[in-house]
Image: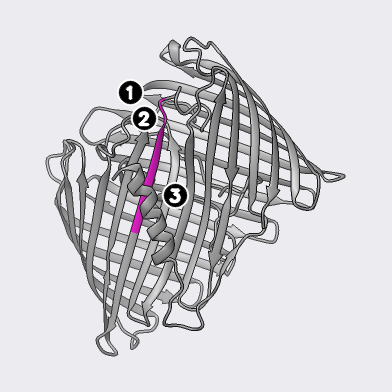
Amino acid sequence: MTTRSCLLFTGVFLATALQPNLASARAGKWECDPSSPVTARLTFVDREPDDTNDNSGQVLQLSPTFRCSRAGGRAEANINYTPTISVGLGDSNPKFLTHQLLASGRLEAVENHFFIGADARAGLNGANSSAETVDAINFNSSNGQQSYAFGITPVYRHRLNRYANFVSSNRFDWVTYSGNDGGDGSDGSRGQTLNASIRSGRYFNAFNWNLNATQRKTFYNSDQEDQTRNDYTAGLGYRFGPRWAVTGLIGYEDNDIQTNRDDTNGFIWDVGARWTPNPRTSVSAEYGDRYFGDRYSANISHRSRRTRLSAGLSRDVSNRRQEQLVDSFFFLEDESGNPLLDQNGNPIVVNNPNLANTDEDFINTQLRGAMTITGRRTSVTITGDIANRDYEVSPRDEDSYGLTVSARRDLGSSINATLTGRTRYVDGSDDGDSDEYEVRFRLSKNLSSRTSAALNLGYRDYNADRSDDSYTETRIGISLTTQLF
C-alpha cells in the first residue's frame, strides 16, 4: 500500500465507516471542536555537530488541527488529525508533509445484528530502536519513517435462542511505511482475523460462557514469511454483584510462525479478575500460559474531578506492525472514552518506542503509565514506560525506558507557560545504546479570544554508540495560532 493509497483509505474511512446511519433519523450529528487550531511556526535550528550541513537553519511550518466527533443514534466516532507542512530555509531540510492521526469509530449498520468498527493511525517513527525522537524538522536527517495503520472490524450477532447467541467478530488491517527507508510500501503488511463463537444467551445472568474458534493471518510485502495463528477456546465467567467479576478459559493453539522455538502448538489457559468499586475506578488482571510461556496483564484506571490515571503491566507476543495499530496504544481518556488532549491539541499518548527495522515477533514485557492533574491555574501531565523486547528469531534484545513530565501554568493577563522535560534510554544488542534528553519551554499570550502568539524554546542532547549520530540541538521558534471556526 503506497502513501497515496493510505491517504485514499483515510478518506474512505471518514466517508463510510464514520458516516451517519442513513436508516436512522435519530443518528447523531458531527461536532467539530470550535477550538481546533491552525498554527504557523518559524523555528531557528542549530545542531552541533552538523557535518551534513542540512540540519541547521530556519523552518517555516503550517499545522491545522481537526478534532471532530459524533455520538448518538447508531454511529459514534472520534477524530484527531494534524497534518504539518514544513518548508526549509537556508540549509535546513525538513519533511515537507507529515501526518499525525488518531481516529476510531463504530457504526450499527443493521440494528442489533451487524456492526462495523474502523480505526486509523498515522505517526512518525525512528529507523531503528536506538534512533532519536523524530519530528518533521529532523525527519530527513534522522532517516525517519512515516507510518500508517488502518483497521476495519465487522461484527455479526444473531440470537439463536434464549440460551445461546452466535457472534462472528472479524478484523482486517493494513500497516505501511514511507520516508527515507523506502516509501513504496515494500515493507508493509496486511492482517486478517476470522472468528466464530457461540456465547451465552439472555437466560444466563451472572454466569456466562463462550466457545471460540479464531484464525489470524499476517501477509508481508517483504521477504518476511507470512504467519498463521489458530486457537480454539472455551471460556467461563461469573459476576459477583456490580463490583467483582472473574473469567477463565482453556483451549488449544496451532501456529505456523517464524521462531527459533521447537514447538509453538499446545494447550493454553487463562484466568482473570476485574474489580470496579465505582464508576470512576477499575482494576483488572489476567494470567495464563501460551507457547512462549507466561502471559499476563494488569491494568488500573481512575478518574476524578481533577485527576486522570491509567497504568498497565503486560507480557505478550508482539511485533513492529502490531505496535502501530490503534488498539495497541495507551492513552488517557475522558468520561466518554475519547482521548485527552495536551496543550497543543494532541492526544496524550504514552511514549511510543522506536522499534528495530524488522517484522519478526518479540516477547514484549512492559510497564506503561500516564497521569494528568488539573488545578485551578496549574496542570501537570506525566507519562512513562519501561520495556524489554526479546526477539524470536535473531538473538536481538532491547531494554528501554522513557519519562516525560509537562507542567502548564496560567500566569494571568492571558499569559500561560509550559515547561516539558523528557528522557529516553535504549540498550539494544544490535542497534546499540542511546540516551536522549530534551527540555522545552513555551510562553503563550492570547491576543484575542481566538488567536494567540507563542515563544518556543527547546534543547535536545542525543548520545549514541555511533559517535557520528550524536548531537546537541537548540531550537528557538515563534508561532501564531488561530481558530478558524
The amino acid beneath tag 2 is: Glu
* Label 2 crowd bin: few (<14), some (14–19), many (20+), radius 10 Å: many
Return the residue at label 1: 429
Residue 452, image quadrant: top right
Whether the magenta-drawn stretch holds residue 440 is answered as: no
Q: How far is the residue under mark 3 from the one under mark 1? A: 25 Å
The amino acid beneath tag 1 is: Ser
Residue 421, image quadrant: top right
Region of the chain picked out in magenta, as a range:
143-151
Left-right relation of 88 to 234: right
Q: How far is the residue under mark 2 from the one under mark 3? A: 19 Å
In the image, residue 123 above or below residue 160: above
* Label 1 crowd bin: few (<14), some (14–19), many (20+), radius 10 Å: few
Disc with the residue nearer the chain's start (3 vs 1): 3
Contact between labelled residues 1 and 3, with CB atoms less than 8 Å apart: no
Q: Where is residue 197 in the image (x, y as percent from the top left)?
A: 23, 72
Disc with the residue nearer the chain's start (2 vs 1): 2
Quadrant, the C terminus? bottom right
Please count the marks in the image: 3
Quadrant, the N terminus? top left
Seen at 41% across and 13% down, the residue is 466
Q: Position of residue 349 (x, y in %)?
A: 52, 46
Contact between labelled residues 1 and 2, with CB atoms less than 8 Å apart: yes
